[in-house]
Amino acid sequence: MGILDGKVAVVTGSGRGIGRAIAKAMAAHGAAVIVNDLGVTVDGKKEPATPADEVVAEIKKSGGIAVPNALDIATVSGGQGVVDHAIREFGKLDILVNVAGILRDRMIFNMAEEEWDEVIRVHLKGHYCTIRPASAHMRERKAGRIINFSSGAALGAPGQPNYAAAKAAILGLTYSSAVALAKYNITVNAIMPGAATRMTDSIPEGRMPGGNFGQSTTATNSPMDPSNVAPVVVFLASDEAQYVNGQAIGAMGYRVTRYSHIVPEVVLMGDGPWTVERLAKSFKSSLGTGLKPPRML
């Protein structure tokens, strides 16, 4: 018996890397999986074929159930289409995992509008485009699991302002959706992963949050193997994780971390309206003490 027996899952961006590992793990634990992958390069350019077919073949060879899907989930029609595919193929959708993403790295002072827009579209809009129809279906059934993918880059990765902005926004989307959907027995959580993938291969050494991850081609059976991210995702997708909602969970190597929500750290309270002069004088000895730069994982 698998922890996901009888469940139906959609995993976006599951042709390679972390998404691939999650799709295979979910199938191994009993879920029927829609393996969604548009088939693009790291920067989002279309490739001749989607790797989703290869992943489905591997799952079926191991005795699992899976079908490929090559829709663009960063469009409303594509997001609706992949949800409809699951319902048409298996009669329902229990689990949505949003992994799909691209990179267009550039410093903020020379980033082109198209580089900004495309990363925001694929990551942030891509989450919206799948969550909207998936949550509508889950709301009717009064059950569901939605697992989003943020990143430690949201905490201050240099050279990735578009990616960092999208990944920080996904946390806000996760928290809002978790609060809104809880009464329908739907949980929404976010993963902040760390693994060696073709996306991390493209980032210059020294600019990677958490240090150099090594090359994805040699990551198998190492701490940075993408398969190390999959167990916590499978758990969050299961009935065992009903009590876990609105959380950001880190999964890097052999370490699993729960991150806190933003909470007040230091509060400066006045006895009336602040003037600039009074605030400048008080700030240094209160809010201005122990300042820390943005921290990367």
Image: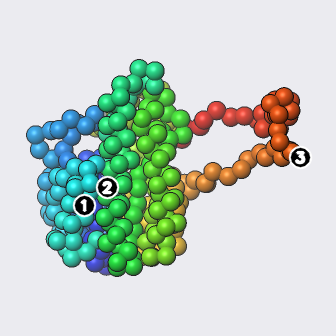
Residue at the spot 35% in from the left edge and 48% down from the top edge: 125
According to the image, label 2 marks what residue? 129
Residue sitting farthest toward the top: 110
Residue contact at pointers 1 and 2, CB within 8 angstroms = yes
- Asked whether residue 213 is in view, the answer is no
Residue 45, quarter of the rendered image: top left
- Asked whether residue 143 is in view, the answer is yes
Q: Which mark, residue 244?
A: none
From the top left corner, tell me how far across and down residue 264 is, in percent. 71, 50
Within 10 Å of the Cα at label 2, are there few (<14), some (14-19), or many (20+) other Cα atoms?
many
Within 10 Å of the Cα at label 1, are there few (<14), some (14-19), or many (20+) other Cα atoms?
some
From the top left corner, tell me how far across and down residue 117 is, in percent. 35, 36
Among the two numbered marks 2 and 3 on one chain, the one whose residue lies closer to the N terminus:
2
Among the two numbered marks 3 and 1 on one chain, the one whose residue lies closer to the N terminus:
1
SS at mark 2 in the image:
helix
According to the image, label 1 marks what residue? 80
